[in-house]
Image: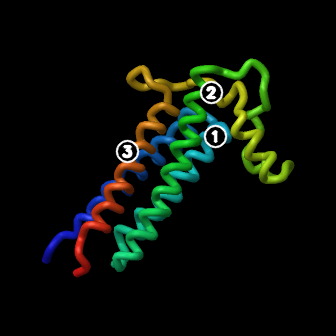
Amino acid sequence: MRSDPLRFTYWLGLILIAVLLSGAFYLQIYRNMAPCPLCLLQRMSMLALGVIFIIGATVKLAKWGHLCLGFLGLLASFSGLLFAGRQVWLQLSPPISSGDCSANLSYIFKLLPVKEALIQVWQGGMECSQTGLEFLYLSLAAWSLICFSILFLLVLLQIIRTITTRPA
């Protein structure tokens, strides 16, 4: 029986995502670090990417199925890159006075139309610009940006593998 390098890579990405989300939930529940709306959007992107990786790892797909998963994975990882990059930007140059980011994400989306809610979350605030816990002199948002970059490259590798492999 031949091992499938596409499935192995999906499993590898899935394990990375499980570790990252477990760490985020540990910090939230046991260290009482409430996530800001940008953090929650990063988690949603990570969760979407995890679902894509579960499908890729467990379901036997045709070439076009792997391509569709790859492009969905690019979309999910790129959205995570955007959210993490924005939070790192806010941490490096905190806003003097901008929108309040301290409201709950679901409350913001209930209160405002989607476009205005996204603009308010994107503008960030003092809570989103706080670095909080640091590991190896990098904030959690910077580590999130690094991990989304790795996952983006992993998905790109999957697409390239899918395009260059011959159908079995």
**Which residue reaches farthest left?**
1
The residue sitting at 71% across, 22% down in the picture is: 95
Q: Amino acid at mark 3?
A: Ile
Is residue 107 visible from the viewing direction of this image?
no
Q: Amino acid at mark 1?
A: Leu
Q: Nearer the viewer, residue 83 or 106?
A: 83
N-terminal of the pair, mark 2 or mark 1, is 1
Left or right of 164 on screen, residue 126: right
Task: Give the structural element (helix, strand or loop) at label 1.
Answer: helix
Q: Is residue 32 above or below residue 168?
A: above
Quadrant in the picture for the C terminus: bottom left
The answer to whether residue 60 of the structure is visible from this angle is yes
Res. 90 mark: 2
Q: Position of residue 132 (x, y in %)?
A: 56, 25
In 3D space, how far apart are the residues under numbered discs 2 and 3 (Cα atoms)?
Answer: 22 Å
Q: From the image, which quarter does the N terminus lie in?
A: bottom left
The answer to which of marks 2 and 3 sits earlier in the sequence is 2
For disc 1, the marked residue is: 38
